[in-house]
Amino acid sequence: MKKQVQVWIFILLLVMCFLVFKFLLKPSFTDTYSPIEPIAMHSKGNGFVGSKACAACHLDIYKTHIETAHFKSSASANIKTVKGSFKAPENVFDLNDSIGFRMNIKKGALYQDIFLKPNNTPVSSSRFDVVIGSGTKGQSYLKWRDSSLYQLQVSYFTPNNSWVNSPGYPSDKLASDRPIFERCLECHLTYAKSTKRFYKRNSYKKTQMVYGIDCERCHGPALNHVNFHRKNPKDTVAMHIVKHSSLTRQQNLDACALCHSGLRMRGNKSPFSFVVGDTLNQFSTPDYTEEDLDKLDVHGNQYGLLSASECFKKSDVMDCTTCHNPHENQRDNHMSFNKKCQSCHNKKEAHVVCRVPEEVQKTSNNNCIHCHMPLVSSKVMKIETAIDTLKPVQVRTHLIGVYTSQ
């Protein structure tokens, strides 16, 4: 009898150990789930969580996406995100014979200091707070004054690796502060929470600025998506998120056209109100027609140029992602783009004979892009590289065609 009692006690102890191990030492994901808090709230009600929240499930995509120009299109200013030099003598920019700028680091922060020549008389000092531009072509910089944003007068131009006068600023005098409105930010930030009033349209909530064109700019605010899948980790069907595979061709084109179709005329819809999946023309309309093709500028109207191309017109499916992978940095990877061209033009039903001499084809590595989408000087984006010297920015045209001068 005593032995039987001992057996039952032993079995009971095993059961208790199993329960302790299961419920205390090995809690499930759901048991420890706590909702993630939004870093900003969209006007339509859903919240932003930032790209880092996406990395938990999409690490490989996150790692490649943060290297793209889109992701780096804006950032909080620091010594890593600002491209220009802060070491003498490269940190000095002479606006003219009497006014100069010096870029300095003071107590860990970056500043543009203005001085009068020849005695280096200090005039004013402005801190770099926000970086605009990935640095592929260049960067401009913004400063906070209370809750309002203004542009600094000196920018950075990558081809010259130098500080330059910001585009549109006068070179004969110090400029008054240029306010930065929502439309300026719409193509460089995922979201900015405006607090504008009728007399101050450049005010924002500093804590609700989502820098860069990140995951949520193309897939929509992801708070509900992330919280759902944190709570339901075994559910592999993506919920509460924009899936581009389910969008129409025009919806996918609209996602890019928002920022790549030039200046647009707005109705009563404010910037940042458009979300991928919406119909863009209900928020803003282009200020050009096909008759204006020769007026479209390569700097900001890639969509208009692409849609005027024969490749685009003769396809029922071609959109921006046919050639571009927004998750990867493909810049200067000509071979990748060439393969996109050849995937269509090498088919028997669409075979195109290259008229360039074979020896030229070999020396150019069969670079389709160089001949059919050449670099073109922008008519509107020009940089003052020296006093009274404007240099147009070179941008690859998206009007695909035959350019005999190449």
Image: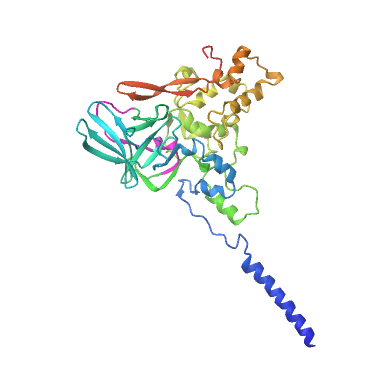
Q: Is residue 247 above or below residue 3?
A: above
Number of dots carrying numbers: 0
**Magenta-tinted stretch:** 168-192
Query: Extreme front residue here?
Result: 88
The residue lying toward the viewer, choosing from 354 and 252, is 354
Viewer can see residue 278: yes
Is residue 238 left or right of 156 when viewed as pictured? right
Q: Quadrant of the N terminus?
A: bottom right
Is residue 344 left or right of 147 when viewed as pictured? right
Find out whether residue 355 is within the magenta segment: no
Residue drawn 53% across the image and 47% down it: 222
Q: How is the image coloured?
A: rainbow
Residue drawn 33% across the image and 27% down it: 168
Find out whether residue 171 is within the magenta segment: yes
Query: Extreme bottom residue here?
Result: 1
The residue lying toward the viewer, choosing from 359 and 214, is 359
**How far across and how far down the image is residue 393, in percent?**
42, 24
Q: Determine which quarter of the picture holds residue 327.
A: top right
**How far across and how far down the image is residue 371, in percent?**
55, 17
Q: Is residue 348 above or below residue 329?
A: above
**How far across and how far down the image is residue 69, in percent?**
49, 35
Residue drawn 58% across the image and 53% down it: 228
**How far across and how far down the image is residue 328, in percent?**
56, 36
Q: Is residue 384 above or below residue 182?
A: above
The residue lying toward the viewer, choosing from 349 and 386, is 386
